[in-house]
Image (cartoon, rainbow, N blue to C red):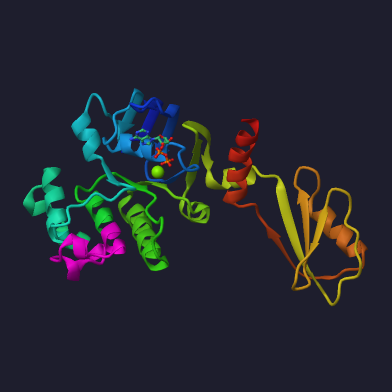
Amino acid sequence: MPGNAIEIEGLRKTYAGGQEALKGIDLAVPAGSIFGLLGPNGAGKSTLINILAGLVIKTAGRVRIWGFDQDVNPRQSRAAIGVMPQEPNMDPFFTPRGTLDTQAGLYGVPKAERRTEEILEMIGLTDKGDAYARSLSGGMRRRLLLGKALVHRPHVLVLDEPTAGVDIELRQMLWANVRRLNEEEGLTVILTTHYLEEAQEMCDEIAIIDKGELIVRDRTEALLSRLDGKTLVILPEGEAPDFAPPPGVTLERRRDGALALGYSRSETSAAEVLDAVRAAGITPRDVRSEEPNLEDVFLSLTGDRRKAG
Ligand SMILES: Nc1ncnc2c1ncn2[C@@H]1O[C@H](COP(=O)(O)OP(=O)(O)O)[C@@H](O)[C@H]1O
Ligand SMILES: [Mg+2]
């Protein structure tokens, strides 16, 4: 097993119309991880993923998938990856069983080694196995696309906005499958999503791209801890008296009577905030802290760039 499932160097894509979708991306995705590729609309996420999938031809740069250079070993690098694209492309006259079987054939999986039934079971389409694809609901088509990406037992699974516009049930089913494949089969997973909460929960590591450039890449916790702002929420014993927060600390009274004290970690410690509360004659009945979330990180990074132009 290579250390990195994917290695990208100096990746550029300029579309025929002159649109520079990727402006030189360097990125490594560790094998065995669940990796989130985030960024605003038009950032270049799908372009990058479609290059990995072999659906878009790169303008410049190097891509290695599972150690195989896309240009030197195209067949091996293609066999190592399975992609669930953002735009579903599906033959409406195929059945799910037929779709999976044909896809396996395209990848040269011998009949005896195909796992059509196992995949149908996993994506919950066993009883729809022989229905025409055009009769499937949107959610079922998505599930079939996931199944298609897995027929050749790839090392790397790439999901482009798999949960955009799908219901909660399908989302949970999708993530449960992704987690299980990652944990039990060691599958490396790369996903893009608009739902930052989802990325925060699912991904070990995250890269954010914006306007074709990589702006940050880090472990999810490390990314979250970059933000300096923190909030201590104190539920007082009884009614809280008037309280002027110390300098550098903001106070917001919540509806449930809690005091939310905002401070920056580099300037103030939680102990100082608590001391000030006690000094004001407030006895905390309950204390909890609110961490910054990925949305805050995202806005602070992409927002700053927008302001800068
Ligand atoms: N086939 C294409 N031809 C020309 N421009 C494209 C094509 N696909 C995407 N683009 C442009 O490239 C940029 C990145 O798009 P995309 O990779 O789809 O971003 P994302 O998936 O992050 O929303 C956008 O400006 C988009 O308009
Ligand atoms: Mg996209």
Q: Quadrant of the C terminus?
A: top right
The residue positioned 32% from the left and 48% from the top of the image is 187
The residue sitting at 37% across, 47% down in the picture is 160
Q: Residue furthest top?
A: 60
Which corner quadrant of the image does residue 147 belong to?
bottom left
Residue 198 shown left or right of residue 135 in the figure: right
Q: Position of residue 181 (x, y in %)?
A: 32, 55
Q: At which x and y percent is residue 161?
A: 39, 50
Q: Is residue 26 left or right of residue 178?
A: right
Relative to residue 105, is residue 50 drawn left or right? Answer: right
From the image, which quarter does the N terminus lie in? top left
Magenta stretch, residue numbers: 120-143
Q: Position of residue 142 (x, y in %)?
A: 30, 57
In the image, taking residue 281 as reference, residue 269 lies left or right, namely left
Frontmost residue, 247 versus 43: 43
Q: Main secondary structure of the magenta part?
A: helix
Q: Is residue 29 visible?
A: yes
Q: Quadrant of residue 288?
A: bottom right
Residue at 39% in and 59% down: 175
Picture quadrant of residue 17: top left
Whether residue 53 is situated above or below residue 87 in the rendered picture: above
Q: Quadrant of ligand 1?
A: top left
Image height of 1 relative to 182, above or below: above
Of all residues, the one furthest to the front in this rendering is: 17
Question: Against 173, is 13 above or below?
Answer: above
Residue 247 part of the magenta segment = no
